[in-house]
Image (cartoon, coloured by chain):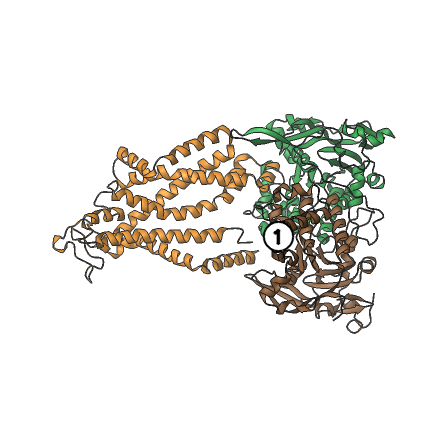
């Protein structure tokens, strides 16, 4: 593993450390049918996901159901194999890792799932769940137990919670326990799939703040997968918006909320209910619903719902337009401008 | 009895008998809903908002006991009605929209068959028709009319579909069409848009608002999402541990929340429209089997006083706003008002 | 944390005692175990085949509660002595079958692919055979004895557990905690044996408990048709067999051993049913 650990993060032209590079990622799930279980079609879950994640930043992957954002996360966690495209981690092709390198990768890259209850073994104490992971990766020994207690305290739980089964914890406590399990092997990159979707508002804020403070302390890199734009605005540095498996806009979060370029991003932002009476300046309501994922996107994925649709939108895939150094959008409107 | 009032819930107490002990789900819930009003019931998990909705429809599970309280709907005391009398109200005068349409739609029948059942059992106009063919025609026309009203795409095709063939947004439109088709006086909508994407949620909420206005229906909108309430409701009740701790118009409660819990909730909410420092409420929701003495919020309240640990706060009326907190009770806190 | 464990335990007891049928079933099962273990201490254990032709075919009386058989042996005494054989055979067969079935079924499901396909076809073939016939054939080859009877039953029985286990593992495999374990880099054997198995095995335990009665019936059936223990081993099935020719003269010879088999089967089924309720995590919130 010596050769692996001496690898450096690659430098881009701008001088930032890029930890993860995702290029043209695609995932089609075959639909099996008939007597012989042949492939009769595909679910086009992810068509094109392309982005970089810099060291110690939080990249938000935003989209509605069917946008493919979770599938991207699963591919990054090496739980699904991409149909096409590549993932580079510290400039290494993740698809070509040997089995020992895969172990190295799984130690550095952790995933926190949306449903903390389902992601814990229901018949294992939290203590055993955490210590098992440390033992397998030979991290934190020889006093695994002390390390487990230390982690629990760090995520806002106590030693007592180590002796609980998952069903004996509250939603917020479970999410913290899952975080402790992810942190126990000193990872670098954590994939957070809807980390607060199952939590109540008052607890959600606690977990978000915990995530922030952990990042400040240990310089973790986060990929935040969520549909909740308020959460995105609160903790992410950059945002990639996906629609029907295709990324449509990528921008620093601050800028995205100020001036979204893609009509879908604009509609998404204006659809979020704001907890302030009479704040609805002017709702931009979208018509229709995303069509079913078994039809392949031919041109612009948003063409059939877009209020500004032009003939060209149904004919050709829009090219990437650079709004500025860090803001890209894929829309014919910006091309025309 | 004020004429403009459609529903009055007074001091409702509901308990669940479980092996763990008595779960005190509602501990004295009082609120009113006016005719044609959308009333928002906000709260976190276990606050009792759904139980309140079920209690009004008298659909509580078997181990639930209504300990005391009164539910007056349109001049009738619902809790004293016999089951068959209640049946005449449920599904006609009070209808429901649920978060998960799967719990409501039967997977083995087409939409037309299910809609038809609702109309045949509940609609007086259709029940009064004698001729069989006439009935079918009336039913069909009514279904198509309702589906058009909820802006269902291709209604003639949709009625031949089974629930699993509809998308989430279409199912929720179908639920709205069914709920409004009988011209009920009150609709209880429990998290109707929680399972939907934001763009679809915006559509469905808009639709619900316009139908509600058109028919003058009263709606109780139960949700955890304060944003949804702000955009849909005229008044809000904030629930905590089986009590409504604060009630008022949406304008006043959002701009100046009185109860420390409401204040905490507003501060804990990350916002999509502006950069805001979020402050979480420490601690967690109390165990309903073992409620703290005094005010149920005092263990998490930063402004808790000695009296909060001992005595449950009274219900105070401050300029038309109702709040349950010692901070505003001149007698109990010796005039200390924030 | 100890309080929590105690509360959980109390809850389990509550579930147990709130179901009357389970309590009855457990009482029956305990009674049988008692008979099997201590039976030889209660009755005169020596020489079960000793003849006493003067007392042959006596109906139930105060002297012989369950009557006597054609050789004048006390039926009650034979039944008590036979309990050990029946219980030993049933539990042995189920235990070995479950061990084989669990491991093979779990591995097959976890590996999947061609191996799984081939394995399941083998199980299908076993199922397609009439089980009793298959067991008879094995007995004919291996020779007649109580141990060979057990072997024959295992050969038939394990396939059911393998199939059940395979289904369970497949269901667990799709769950999120297994995915999480994979993403944490835990090795495959560890995921299978430490994570999936403990979650998948409970339905098997339920089914095993219920099967003890079934195995007892099958064993009795085989020995009834003469494929089983020697006449000197008072296994219940063989007792029934002995009584068959005297059905109309001395029905008690068949009746009481038959009743014992029936009751055992009932008891284990009741316990299995209750176990299912107690172990069901949905019931445990």
Q: Name the residue nearer the viewer: B26 or B180.
A: B180
Label 1, on which residue? A169
User: Which residue is drawn at the image coordinates 68% and 47% (left, top)?
Assistant: B144
Tell me what residue is drawn at x 64 percent, y 67 percent.
B78
The image quarter containing residue A294 is top right
Question: Would you say residue C105 is visible in this rendering?
Answer: yes
Q: Is residue B166 left or right of residue A281?
A: left
- Position in image of residue A176 (x %, y %): 66, 48
Question: Could you say which is closer to the camera, residue B137 or residue C2?
Answer: B137
Colour brown maps to chain: B
Give the farthest residue toward the right: A337
Q: Name the residue located 67 percent from the left edge and 60 percent from the top edge.
A: B94
Where is residue B154 shown, x and y percent of the image?
69, 41
Q: Which of the 4 image quadrants contains residue B234?
A: bottom right
Instruction: Mark yes or no: residue A150 visible.
Output: no
Kindly indicate which chain is depicted in green in the rendered structure. A
SS state under label 1: loop
- Label 1 chain ID: A
Q: Front-most of B68 and C56? A: B68
Give percent across and percent down for residue B122: 63, 57
In the depicted structure, whether residue A90 falls above or below residue B172: above
> Where the N terminus of chain B falls, by quadrant?
bottom right
Chain C is shown in which shade?
Answer: orange
């Amino acid at each position: 593993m010596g050769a692996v650990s001496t690898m450096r993060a690659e430098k881009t032209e701008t001088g930032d450390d890029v930890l993860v590079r995702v290029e043209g990622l695609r995932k089609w799930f075959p639909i099996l049918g008939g007597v012989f279980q042949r492939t009769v079609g595909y679910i086009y879950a992810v068509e094109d996901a392309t982005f970089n994640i810099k060291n110690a930043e939080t990249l938000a992957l935003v989209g509605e159901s069917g946008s493919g954002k979770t599938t991207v996360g699963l591919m990054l966690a090496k739980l699904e194999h991409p149909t096409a495209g590549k993932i580079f981690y510290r400039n290494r092709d993740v698809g070509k890792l040997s089995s020992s390198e895969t172990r190295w990768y799984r130690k550095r890259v952790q995933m926190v799932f949306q449903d903390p209850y389902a992601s814990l073994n229901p018949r294992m104490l939290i203590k055993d769940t955490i210590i098992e992971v440390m033992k397998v990766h030979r991290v934190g020994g020889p006093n695994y137990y002390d390390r487990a207690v230390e982690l629990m305290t760090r995520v806002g739980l106590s030693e007592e919670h180590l002796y609980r089964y998952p069903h004996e914890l509250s939603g917020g406590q479970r999410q913290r326990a899952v975080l402790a399990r992810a942190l126990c092997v000193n990872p670098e990159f954590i994939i957070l799939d809807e980390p607060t979707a199952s939590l109540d508002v008052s607890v959600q804020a606690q977990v978000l703040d915990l995530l922030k403070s952990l990042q400040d302390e240990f310089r973790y890199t986060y990929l935040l997968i969520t549909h909740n734009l308020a959460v995105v605005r609160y903790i992410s540095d950059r945002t990639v918006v996906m629609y029907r498996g295709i990324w449509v806009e990528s921008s620093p979060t601050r800028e995205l909320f100020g001036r979204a370029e893609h009509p879908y991003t604009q509609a998404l932002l204006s659809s979020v209910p704001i907890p302030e009476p009479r704040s609805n300046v002017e709702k931009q309501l979208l018509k229709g619903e995303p069509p079913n994922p078994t039809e392949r996107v031919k041109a612009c994925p948003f063409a059939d719902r877009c209020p500004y649709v032009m003939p060209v939108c149904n004919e050709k895939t829009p090219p990437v337009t650079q709004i500025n150094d860090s803001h890209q959008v894929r829309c014919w409107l910006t091309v025309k401008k | 009895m004020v004429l403009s009032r459609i529903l009055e819930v007074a001091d409702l107490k509901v308990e669940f008998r479980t092996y763990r002990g008595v779960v005190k789900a509602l501990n004295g819930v009082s609120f009113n809903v006016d005719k044609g009003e959308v009333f928002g019931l906000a709260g976190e998990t276990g606050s009792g908002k759904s139980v309140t909705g079920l209690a009004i429809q008298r659909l509580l599970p078997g181990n639930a006991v209504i300990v005391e309280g009164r539910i007056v709907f349109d001049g009738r005391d619902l809790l004293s009605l016999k089951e068959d009398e209640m049946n005449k109200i449920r599904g006609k005068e009070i209808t429901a929209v649920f978060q998960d349409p799967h719990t409501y739609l039967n997977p083995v029948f087409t939409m037309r068959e299910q809609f038809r059942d609702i109309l045949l059992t509940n609609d007086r106009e259709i029940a009064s028709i004698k001729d069989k063919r006439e009935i079918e025609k009336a039913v069909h026309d009514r279904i198509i009319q309702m589906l058009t009203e909820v802006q269902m795409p291709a209604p003639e095709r949709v009625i031949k579909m089974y629930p699993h063939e509809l998308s989430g947004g279409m199912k929720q439109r179908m639920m709205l069409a069914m709920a409004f088709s009988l011209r009920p006086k009150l609709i209880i909508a429990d998290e109707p848009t929680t399972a939907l994407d934001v763009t679809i949620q915006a559509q469905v909420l808009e639709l619900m608002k316009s139908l509600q206005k058109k028919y003058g229906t009263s709606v109780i909108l139960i949700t955890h999402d304060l944003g949804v309430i702000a955009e849909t409701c005229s008044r809000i009740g904030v629930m905590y541990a089986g009590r409504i701790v604060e009630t008022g118009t949406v304008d006043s409660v959002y701009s100046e929340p009185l109860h420390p819990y409401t204040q905490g909730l507003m501060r804990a909410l990350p916002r999509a429209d502006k950069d805001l420092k979020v402050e979480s409420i420490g601690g967690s929701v109390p165990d309903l089997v073992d409620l703290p003495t005094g005010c149920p919020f005092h263990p998490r309240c930063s402004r808790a006083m000695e009296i909060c640990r001992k005595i449950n706060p009274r219900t105070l009326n401050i300029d038309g706003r109702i709040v349950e907190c010692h901070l505003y009770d001149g007698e109990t806190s010796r005039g200390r008002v924030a | 944390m100890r309080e929590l464990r105690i509360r959980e335990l109390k809850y389990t007891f509550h579930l147990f005692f709130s179901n009357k049928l389970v309590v009855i079933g457990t009482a029956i099962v305990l009674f049988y175990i008692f008979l099997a273990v201590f039976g030889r201490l209660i009755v005169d254990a020596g020489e079960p085949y000793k003849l006493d032709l003067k007392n042959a075919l006596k109906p139930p009386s105060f002297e012989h509660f369950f009557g006597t058989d054609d050789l004048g042996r006390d039926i009650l005494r034979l039944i008590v002595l036979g309990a050990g054989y029946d219980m030993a055979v049933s539990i042995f067969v189920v235990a070995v079958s479950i061990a084989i079935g669990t491991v093979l079924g779990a591995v097959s499901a976890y590996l999947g692919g061609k191996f799984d396909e081939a394995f399941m076809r083998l199980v299908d073939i076993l199922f397609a055979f009439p089980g009793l016939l298959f067991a008879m054939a094995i007995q004919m080859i291996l020779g007649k004895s109580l141990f060979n009877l057990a072997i024959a039953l295992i050969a038939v029985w394990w396939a059911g557990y393998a199939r059940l286990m395979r289904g369970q593992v497949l269901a667990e495999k799709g769950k999120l905690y297994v995915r999480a374990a994979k993403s944490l880099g835990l090795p495959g054997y560890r995921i299978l044996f430490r994570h999936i198995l403990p979650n998948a095995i409970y339905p098997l335990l339920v089914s095993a408990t219920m099967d003890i009665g079934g195995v007892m019936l099958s064993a009795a059936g085989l020995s009834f048709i003469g494929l089983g223990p020697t006449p000197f081993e008072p296994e219940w099935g063989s007792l029934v067999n002995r009584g068959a020719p005297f059905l109309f003269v001395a029905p008690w010879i068949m009746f009481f051993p038959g009743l014992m088999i029936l009751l055992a089967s009932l008891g284990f089924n009741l316990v299995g049913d209750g176990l299912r309720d107690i172990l069901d995590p949905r019931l445990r919130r």
